[in-house]
Image (spheres, rainbow, N blue to C red):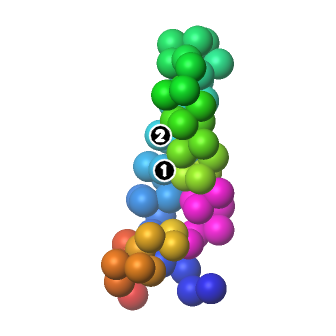
C-alpha cells in the first residue's frame, strides 16, 4: 500500500472528522444523517492515520508531494 495523502490533506480530514464527532456528541446532528456522517468521520480518521485513500487510487490521484 503506497501512501497517497499529503500532510495538508491528512490534517483537513482529521479536523473535519473531529468537527463531525463533536457535533454528533452534542446532538446537533442526529438520526440517520448523524450516523452516516459519523461513519464518514471514522473513514476520514482511518485514512488520515494510514495516509492512504482508496478512492484516490481508483481515480489516479495523489495529494502527496513527490
Q: Secondary structure at mark 2?
A: helix
**Residues marked 2 and 1 touching at CB (< 8 Å):** yes
Q: Position of residue 61 (x, y in %)?
A: 35, 78
Q: Quadrant of the N terminus?
A: bottom right
- Residue depicted at 39% across the width and 87% down the height: 66
Q: Nearer the viewer, residue 39 or 17?
A: 39
Q: Residues within 10 Å of mark 1 (few under 14, many from 20)?
A: many
Residue 15 drawn in magenta? no
Q: Residue furthest front?
A: 32
Q: Residues within 10 Å of mark 2 (few under 14, many from 20)?
A: some
Which residue is label 2 attached to? Answer: 16
Q: Position of residue 17 (x, y in %)?
A: 54, 40
* In the depicted structure, whether residue 44 falls above or below residue 5: above
Q: Position of residue 13 (x, y in %)?
A: 48, 50
Which quadrant of the figure has residue 55? bottom left
Magenta region, residue range? 46-52
Amino acid at each position: 500500500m503506497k501512501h497517497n495523502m499529503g500532510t495538508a490533506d491528512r490534517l483537513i480530514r482529521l479536523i473535519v472528522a473531529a468537527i463531525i464527532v463533536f457535533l454528533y456528541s452534542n446532538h446537533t446532528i442526529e438520526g440517520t444523517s448523524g450516523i452516516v456522517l459519523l461513519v464518514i468521520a471514522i473513514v476520514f480518521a482511518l485514512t488520515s492515520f494510514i495516509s492512504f485513500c482508496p478512492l484516490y487510487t481508483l481515480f489516479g490521484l495523489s495529494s502527496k508531494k513527490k
